[in-house]
Amino acid sequence: MAGTTHPTLNDIPESTRGQVIDLLNQRLADAIDLQLQAKQAHWNVKGSQFIALHKLFDEIHSAALEYVDLLAERVIQLGGIAEGTGAIVAERSELPQYPINISSGEEHVWALSNALASFGERIRQAIGETDELGDADSTDICTEISRGVDKWLWFVEAHAEGAARTQARA
Ligand SMILES: [Fe+2]
């Protein structure tokens, strides 16, 4: 990751901007992965809760796309290059790999809960990191995303029943 690459009159010190850019590019890779995982779930889920989960997973995909845009455009505003290609995301994402051979609602609820919880943990860390670096606007963006992710995790986990709920937490 390259830090600042483009000049800007933005008054945040360049060293701060460089560190925030690198940090946000890492979270950008995770957010793009989350967005793809939500579509994977949307397409492949089957079972008695199909229509509810099919719609919910697509809503999560749309929300994740907004997070992707917020993170990428903040990187540009700070004088950096948004690094959002498939090759970079595949190499850099810190989210667990989405399981391919699953189909039941229970399995997709478990898998997408894991993805949301993992992304939520990382974006929450970014709230503290950007705050320490003194970039309140990036902190605000990460907080907004974190609030959204916590809500989606609640929505998905609310579909887990009995044993599946305990398993998701294990
Ligand atoms: Fe669709």
Image: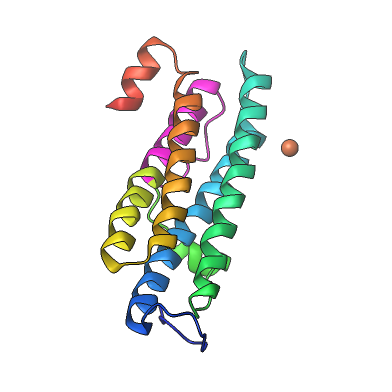
Query: Which residue is depicted at the point 40% across and 47% down?
Result: 119
State whether residue 97 appears in this view.
no
State whether residue 86 appears in this view.
yes
Query: Which residue is depicted at the point 40% across and 50% down?
Result: 95
Asked if 153 appears above or below 48 in the picture, the reply is: below
Q: Position of residue 89 (x, y in %)?
A: 49, 63
> Is 99 one of the magenta-colored residues?
yes
Depth check, front residue: 141 or 88: 141
Depth check, front residue: 91 or 152: 152
Q: Quadrant of the C terminus?
A: top left
The stretch of residues the image draws in magenta is 96-118
Q: Position of residue 6 (x, y in %)?
A: 52, 87
Asked if 161 appears above or below 28 in the picture, the reply is: above
Q: Position of residue 93 (x, y in %)?
A: 42, 58
Q: Image quadrant of ligand 1?
A: top right
Q: Quadrant of residue 91?
A: bottom left
> For the stretch drawn in magenta, what is the main secondary structure?
helix
Query: Which residue is depicted at the point 38% across and 70% down?
Result: 20
Asked if 60 appears above or below 9 in the picture, the reply is: above
Q: Quadrant of residue 39?
A: top right
Q: Is residue 111 left or right of residue 129?
A: right
